[in-house]
Image (cartoon, rainbow, N blue to C red):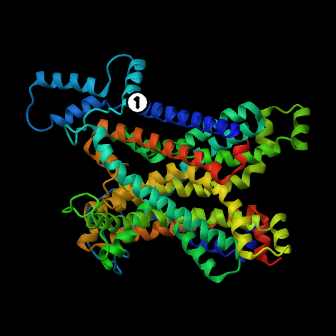
Amino acid sequence: MKVLIDLLRYNREFLLGTILISIILALVAASFFAPYDELATYVVIPDMPPSAEYWLGTTSRGQEVFWQLAAAMRNTLLFGVVVALVSRVIAIAVGLVSGYLGGRVDQVIMAINDTLNALPNIPILLLLVFVLRDQMSWPILAVTAALLGWQHDSRLIRSVALSLRNREFTRHAVFSGMRTGQILWREHLPYVMPIVFYTTMNNLIWAIGLEVTLSILGFSDINRPTIGGMIYWANAHSAMVAGIWWWIVVPMAFVVILFLGLFMLAMSVNEYIDPRSRLARMGA
Amino acid sequence: MHGFLIYVLKRLGQFLFVVFTGVTLAFLIAHFSPVDPIEQTVSLLTSFGNTDPRSVELLRESLRELYGTDGSLLEQYFTFWGRVLTGDFGPSLSAFPTPVSTVIGRALPWTVGLLTLATLLAWTIGNLFGALAGYFRNNRFLKGVGVLVMSMQPIPTYIVGLTLIIVFGYLWPVLPISGGAQLNLEPGFTWAYISSVLVHGTLPALTLVCVGLGGWFISMRSLVSNIVTEDHVVYAELAGVRGRTIFSQYVARNAMLPQVTGLALTLGHVFGGAVIVEFVFNYPGVGKLLIAGIYAGDYSLVLGVTTIAIIAVAAAMFLIDILYPLIDPRVKLG
């Protein structure tokens, strides 16, 4: 708790990130009180500019931009969180095991790790989207994205685990008869948690970016509101040319808010992990 | 020299392993999908008007041969490898009867040119400013640059591209927002054509540079600010070495090494960004080809582009790894 207050006081990035993410979370909370079904179209007058009645205007599909945005933000965040969680589990497992076992096993695991890392994600995802077509749903997409997005982080975790391997307490644990799984879970996991938090933020940014990109291209369930999906529909109705700018500018602006918020938080968490730069900032 | 040879062989092994894994993965995804590409194509081709059932059967047969779905799984796998190695992915359905390899060959130079230029620009500018910002920690201007490039870095490529289109295409229409060159110009080494290519490439390249800059800036700044506190730098300062020499020879040169390795590692990611940029700006490269292929249901084109992309990215990484000993002489000694 004290850490949080300190961060808010001395770390402008953390403060700004918290504010930006609060806006997003408020929007997500609002989505549960939407007056319309998020899938329904033509519930309000189409193409109305922002006004007192329609805060952010309405779309050519007769939906209110504000409530669409709220639902879209919730769905997009959910996607990002699922990807981040699943890929964290893989990254932690691979990183800890590889670092703890070391030697040959470590070499083999890391060779596989680097190979997977070298494969370009977007073409592989697009190929999968292509062959699955209509059977592509967001959970499948999330799991696939998670399978493509852990290699970088597992390498970071492994480098920490490698240094824990020869520490006194690890040896104690081994001699006192703890099983390997227990050592990793109870002794090593707490040490890598700061790195896990930091990489989670970055992974969230990556996953949401991926979702936005794929839905803008129309490669996900386009009826389910997402940030990218909103832009997809706006493009499909040539909103920019027709002068319905609020339809496309609003989701873009909120994507920027979301990404900046997450990025600021990631930066400040990174700074928290590296105490040298924190001290420099506090003027010590 | 001996150490260098071992180094190259190791990298070559890794390159081959990456290609092998990627091609196998592409094969498996394409093969185990619940959607049958043959039936899909058949329904695509027969959706207009009535077609004679016998000709449909003939169509199925020739498609089976075309997509290499004859025989057992292992046989199909070897057929696929044979096609990859000879670069023969059959004719493209959306540009029938042009072979997929020709279509890709036409698009590849655009992507390679755009990517090489944008990546080198982003890498150079990002590292230069990052190094300066790490060395002169209290410089106001550099801090401002830092805030600017870092806030652009997390934003998805598409959003950056679209913003640039809105700014330079609608609000202040000075740059072309679509295509690779002016359409009525004959391609060739004429000044008009080359300048048209450059002008059309400005916004796509600018998008990639904007997105790529921040990552290099951040990592270079933290690398440099760590190296600055190291003993050899302090010693050089005490010995009265000129500031400029310290910066370029003692600090920046050491900090560059991990950045070159980083360049190789991020290429796959950069390629993904290029796919999006080409889509946004309607740029005639392989990324746009891939997306157009998906929209058109062109199975052989999509599979061909994916495979080529995997191999090309792996090859570019291999190239960077091979050039690495030029800047880090320790590798040569082994």
- In the rendered image of this protein, does residue A97 appear above or below residue A240? above
Viewed as shown, does residue A260 lie left or right of B208? Answer: right
Quarter occupied by residue B296: top left
Left/right of residue B118 with respect to residue B261 in the rendered view: left
Point out residue B112 in the picture as x, y percentages from the top left corner: 41, 52
Q: Mark 1 lies on which chain?
A: B
Where, quadrant-wise, is the C terminus of chain B in this rendering? top right
The local secondary structure at tag 1 comes to helix
Question: A150 or B183: nearer the eye?
Answer: B183
Seen in the picture, residue A177 relative to A151 is either above or below; the reply is above
The picture places residue B39, in percent across and down from the top left corner, at: 25, 29
Q: Can residue A243 be seen in this view?
A: yes
Identify the residue at the far bottom of this view: B140
Camera-nearest residue between A193 and B171: B171
Front position in the image: A28 or A280: A280
Which residue is located at x 69 percent, y 44 percent?
B332
The percent position of residue A104, horizontal first and vertical second, equals 73, 31
A10, above or below B115, in the image: below
What's the amino acid at mark 1? Leu
Q: How crowded is mark 1: few (under 14 residues within 10 Å), some or many (20 or more)?
A: few
- Residue nearest the observer in this picture, B249 or B31: B249
Which of the image's four quarters has the N terminus of chain B?
A: top right
Position in image of residue A77 (x %, y %) = 51, 57
The quadrant in which residue B257 appears is bottom right
Residue A216: name its quadrant: bottom left
- B176 left or right of B128? left
Q: Which residue is drawn at 71% across and 60% down?
A: B254
**What residue do we see at 56% from left, 39% from top?**
A116
Q: How many labels does the image show?
A: 1
Mark yes or no: residue B230 visible.
no
Q: Which residue position holds label 1? A: B85
